Image: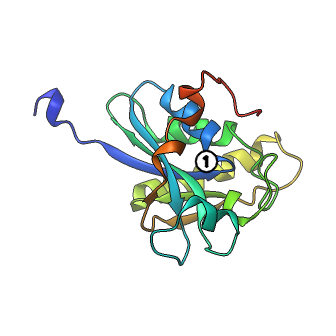
Amino acid sequence: MNDSQAKLNLATFGAGCFWGVELRFRELPGVTDAAVGYAGGTTEHPDYDSVCTGNTGHAEVVQVQFDPRLVSYAEILKVFWSQHDPTTLNRPGPDVGSQYRSVIFVHDEQQRAAAERSKEDVNRSGRWSNPVVTTIETAPVFYRAEDYHQQYLARRGITSCNI
């Protein structure tokens, strides 16, 4: 198998507003793509306006494509945990609502086991005074967000999501 045939993996996370999370994942060596979108709800083909109502059940998420030869899922989980407060239900940052919930959508049982271990490690770390409320769920359908949301911060020359 040559480099162009390497198997890429997916990881999907909700950690608040997807713009800043997507930016940080893109900076990680071994990440070949990061797309913002929606997952975990009941509405098919949701759009940003419908997700923002909180009525679709979807979370704003980032789907990360990565080369496991260059970056491990454990390393990607570390970036996920560093991007938000995983102890506040539906408010992992400045935005509030179930669409901003902290969630790890796993794509296989190995990811589930790694996510569970990392959640336990974060809880034991003492970094947070409250327990982690992040859920770990089987990856549902990922709906890619509208083009104007993709690489939103980078296209504007913004380096953090404090806007």
Looking at the picture, how far across and down is residue 86, in whole percent? 74, 51
Nearer to the camera, 130 or 34: 34
Q: Which quarter of the figure has residue 84? A: top right
Looking at the picture, how far across and down is residue 21, in whole percent? 61, 39
Nearer to the camera, 18 or 8: 18
Residue at (89%, 48%) from the top-left corner? 129
Q: Is residue 132 above or below residue 68?
A: below
Nearer to the camera, 118 or 76: 76
Residue at (68%, 36%) from the top-left corner? 82
Looking at the picture, how far across and down is residue 44, in whole percent? 46, 74
From the viewer's perspective, tell me whether residue 16 is left or right of residue 47. Answer: right
Looking at the picture, how far across and down is residue 87, in whole percent? 80, 54
Q: Quadrant of the N terminus?
A: top left
Residue at (61%, 46%) from the top-left corner? 18
How many tags in the picture? 1
Q: Which residue is mark 1?
A: 118
What amino acid is labelled 1 in the image? Ser
